[in-house]
Amino acid sequence: MLTATLIILLSIFSLASSSQSQSQSTTDVCIIGSGIAGSSVAHFLRKYSPTISQIRIFERHPVVGGRMATVTIAGETFEAGASILHPKNYHALNFTHMLNLKVKGPSASDSSFSLGIWDGQKFLFKTIDSDSKSQLVQYFISFANSIRMLFRYGISLIKMNNFVEVTVDNFLKYYESKESRPVFSSVEEMLKWADLYNLTTQTLEEELVGLKFSPLLIQELITVITRINYGQSVRISGLAGAVSLAGSGGDLWSVEGGNWQMAAGLIDRSNVTLHLQEEISLITDVGGFYELNSTNGNSYTCQITVVATPLDELTTQFIPEIYIPERKLQHTHATFVRGVLNPAYFGLNAVSDIPELVGTIESSELPFTCISVLKEHSANDFTYKLFSRQSLTDALLDQIFSIRNETLRINWGAYPHYHAPEVFAPFILDDMHLYYVNAFENAASTMETSAVSAENMARLILSRLAGQQPSGSYGLKSSTSDSNLQHPEL
Ligand SMILES: Cc1cc2nc3c(=O)[nH]c(=O)nc-3n(C[C@H](O)[C@H](O)[C@H](O)COP(=O)(O)OP(=O)(O)OC[C@H]3O[C@@H](n4cnc5c(N)ncnc54)[C@H](O)[C@@H]3O)c2cc1C
Ligand SMILES: *[C@@H]1O[C@H](CO)[C@@H](O)[C@H](O)[C@H]1NC(C)=O
Ligand SMILES: *[C@@H]1O[C@H](CO)[C@@H](O)[C@H](O)[C@H]1NC(C)=O
Ligand SMILES: *[C@@H]1O[C@H](CO)[C@@H](O)[C@H](O)[C@H]1NC(C)=O
Ligand SMILES: *[C@@H]1O[C@H](CO)[C@@H](O)[C@H](O)[C@H]1NC(C)=O
Ligand SMILES: *[C@@H]1O[C@H](CO)[C@@H](O)[C@H](O)[C@H]1NC(C)=O
């Protein structure tokens, strides 16, 4: 997934990497994947249980973080994958505070960035831009832009905020205390409890047409947003759509220096044995426990195995075989360019006329989904990020850019290709202790949803362990008097 062009931040954890290549050892929990999902499972297992003895995390890459990664282009570092967090992403906020990381808010220029909606021939809509640093001027421009948007899209724009707010409020139920929040053993159950399930049974388009949104708003602005956040059209599920719209508002943030540090910090603090550059190729149920074989020739014995990566493109073999609904990953090609866009490509005269964010509508002719300015170094020197569904050739980039001093390409198996009605893989892949955190990605794929799924997963594991061992030393009380969705095994 990470190409050789991705400049790797060799984390200090390479030191902790397994040098002791024992061929057999007893282990309680083995986690496959060091992204936010795997690292959060480790964190919450430690938080909720003093009795889990050993936690191993396997990571096939030399660094932790998975789809949270940075690129360094022309000496500066930018998010290459997951970049933005919502102000109500409370697990991510708590991790950031707990780990003494710094929140990077939107800079003044980010909050009043200019947007253009490009159809391949012309801009259908453009906000007004200004280089003025005056707060008052910025305020009037953003006010004028709101009026322009209202003129084009009508009062549906306000309905859009309501739609997002209702969904976000429902999602907040997942932060309720453990006393009032059940342990969920399936994605469906988890979504139904928060009144989010219905949103996965219809497409975003169907949902918004039902709410009488203006067709122009759906085809233009909302399509621009779903294409940026999920690389897909408004035919994604209503839930993935609402989540992607929530990721287009104000007050978005990220972790200064890279979101991957959340995973690194959680792993560092959870007494995890981290095996970097060790890919698990085979998981065998050997009766009562699992044997994990890696491509390094090692073998590990685990009572509990947690898959914390999408299984869709994985070559990992399971014995006996497991069956999950077929799912395709949407690939997003991220291309980073240091240089200058060519205004003529957009039918414009000057670079300064090109919006800082060029979004696009659904059109088979469009070679990219968006282009954004990551940094303006000077009037004739920028760093840009482009997303596209296919790799961008040099020939094409030479048309889009008039100067291109450095180019980096990453092909991400980015997130699920969403459908409605959505089908979900199980959290529990067998009848025993083989778990799948990323089943929740079919609801919506974000850093926070991964953490929310991981927190529930830790509770699910502990409650099922407690159920197996009537002595119940885990002390997990999952009383759910106010819910009829109580986990059957509690
Ligand atoms: C371009 C892009 C932009 C995005 N933007 C945002 C955003 O702005 N905000 C947001 O919240 N989310 C965003 N996302 C989504 C977000 O990145 C994911 O939802 C989240 O990071 C998933 O984390 P994870 O831990 O579940 O999986 P991953 O981060 O993919 O972690 C899985 C890990 O498992 C490892 N692995 C896989 N197989 C094996 C094996 N057999 N053995 C050992 N290790 C293995 C992988 O190398 C990987 O490190 C974006 C994603 C992409 C690609
Ligand atoms: C960390 O876990 C190991 C088992 O893997 C255990 O022996 C050790 O005591 C733990 N260390 C701390 C500080 O809890
Ligand atoms: C975040 O941390 C605060 C303070 O420790 C705590 O009260 C709150 O419950 C935490 N939120 C989540 C979602 O864990
Ligand atoms: C979800 O849909 C079902 C069936 O149409 C309906 O009975 C239920 O009330 C809906 N739930 C919510 C929260 O809208
Ligand atoms: C997995 O590892 C064990 C222990 O080394 C070994 O006995 C077994 O043959 C391995 N399985 C495969 C398929 O290589
Ligand atoms: C880009 O490359 C050109 C040609 O090598 C050089 O003149 C120019 O200074 C470079 N610009 C930047 C911003 O590095």
Image: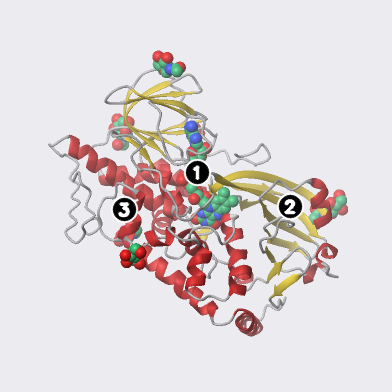
Residue 225 vs 156, above or below: the answer is above
Nearer to us: label 1 or label 2: 1
Distance from the alpha carbon under mark 1 to that under mark 2: 32 Å
Q: Residue 173, position in %: x, y?
A: 32, 62
Query: Circle 2 is placed at which residue position?
Result: 337
Distance from the alpha carbon under mark 1 to that under mark 3: 20 Å
Colouring scheme, one of rainbow, by chain, secondary structure, one colour: secondary structure
Q: Quadrant of residue 367?
A: bottom right
Label 1 crowd (10 A; few <14 / some 14-19 / many >=20) = some
- How many numbered dots are placed on residues in this image? 3
Sequence-wise first label, 1 or 3: 3
Q: Residue 29, position in %: x, y?
A: 33, 33
User: Is 188 or 376 nearer to us in this picture?
Assistant: 188
Q: Is residue 50 left or right of residue 236?
A: left
Amino acid type shown at disc 3: Glu
User: Is 124 or 259 nearer to us in this picture?
Assistant: 124
Distance from the alpha carbon under mark 2 to that under mark 3: 44 Å
Mark 1 and mark 3 residues within 8 Å of each other at the beta carbon: no
Query: Circle 3 is placed at which residue position?
Result: 189
User: Which dot marks residue 327?
Assistant: 1
Q: Secondary structure at mark 2?
A: strand
Amino acid type shown at disc 2: Val
Label 2 crowd (10 A; few <14 / some 14-19 / many >=20) = many
Kindly tell me whether residue 13 is visible in this rendering: no
